[in-house]
Amino acid sequence: MKQMSLSTTGFERKTKRTRKREFLDEMNLVVPWAELVGLIAPHAPARGAKGGRPPFAVETMLRIHFLQQWFNLSDPAMEEALYDTPMFREFARLDMGEDHLPDESTILRFRHLLEAHDLSLQILATVNATLTAKGLLLKQGTVVDATLIAAPSSTKNSTGTRDPEMHQTKKGNQWHHGMKAHIGSDADLGLVHSVTTTAANAHDITQAHALLHGQETDVFADSGYRGVEKREEIQTKHPGVNWHIAMMPGKRKAMDKSTPMGAILEQLEKIKASIRAKVEHPFRVIKRQFGYVKVKYRGLAKNTANLVTLFALSNLWMVRKRLLNMGAQG
């Protein structure tokens, strides 16, 4: 399909390269489009209904799906953005003069296609395989952690009820209603390799076994995971892992740091904290860079698929400069 630039719209005088365009140009270069399209194409409809329009290209729909994730857009908002924002149409490889653009139902069906075939997990695996091949995703160490994702607590909706798969939990002195995203990330760059979700009231430690890929020798976690090495599922599936759990804050505060042993333990805690900090990077990316602070859908399954895709894209975003430099050097 013919690609056109903004120069054909009548606004030939461009005085500034916006951050949004810079972002899209960078992501366009680092996303492994061919591999992802090859992953999805076997499941996509080959042709439209008899007498109907042919379906949009898989790559076009995938690009639109990623635009939704990067800019936190609903299906109706994504449809409107395609009409309102020439830059989005250009990124999606849609003809700038096209009078027929994907509507919200088409966008919804593509998302359901990804959900039905668990393709978000395969998208994450494909992205990580690309990063591993480039030496950016190491296997020796993993950091595990979880973050709360808010969900609507109001019952003023079509069903008159809260989402039954979301629950509330107390963190500090504040109550939160929603779900938890649990991740296992590379201890070197913080790239996510494993994702699970639970209701907000589930303890972090219950998901620890599912966040390890099996090749790590060391795992780092905060004090909420103390005792994890004694759990049956850990001893069964990951018996040889060395767990480095943070000391309880109260115990660390009471420790006499003036003694030689106290000074050594304090330095060890600082080293462990510096490694654990890597796991906060993907959380910051999806919440601050991509604007994902509340669930989009009802039920854990749909929100899990959404989160897995977000973490795949966060991996690419966090190492985009390295990938671009590799491309320039190649």
Image: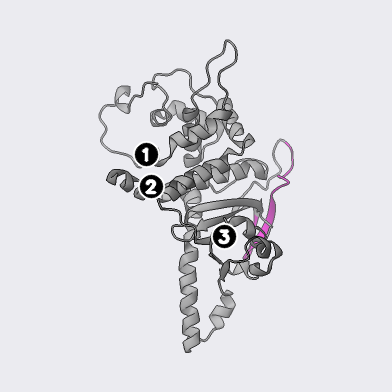
> Could you say where residue 123 lies in the image, as x and y percent from the top left?
52, 41
Q: Amino acid at mark 1?
A: Leu
The answer to whether any part of residue 149 appears in the image is yes
Q: Amino acid at mark 2?
A: Arg
Mark 3 → mark 1, Cα distance in angstroms: 30 Å
Residue pointed to by mark 1: 29
The answer to whether any part of residue 179 appears in the image is no
Q: Which of these two is toward me, 170 or 235?
A: 235
Asked if 254 appears above or below 202 in the picture, the reply is below
Label 3: few (<14), some (14–19) or many (≥20) C-alpha neighbours in 10 Å: many
Mark number, residue 145: 3
What kind of element bears circle 3? strand
Q: Which of these two is toward me, 67 or 189?
A: 189
> Could you say where residue 261 lies in the image, as x and y percent from the top left?
50, 86
Name the side, left or right, on which 54 lies relative to 97: right
Asked if 53 appears above or below 300 in the picture, the reply is above
Name the side, left or right, on which 111 lies relative to 325: right
Pointer 3 or 2: first along the chain: 3
Look at discs 3 and 1 and give the one toward the viewer: 1
Q: Amino acid at mark 3?
A: Asp
Q: Are marks 2 and 1 in contact (CB under 8 Å)?
A: yes
Residue pointed to by mark 2: 320
Residue 237 within the segment the image draws in magenta: no
Residue at the spot 49% in from the left edge and 69% down from the top edge: 273
Residue at the spot 57% in from the left edge and 43% down from the top edge: 121
Query: To which quarter of the image does residue 14 belong?
Result: top left
What kind of element bears circle 2? helix
| Residues drawn in magenta | 159-176
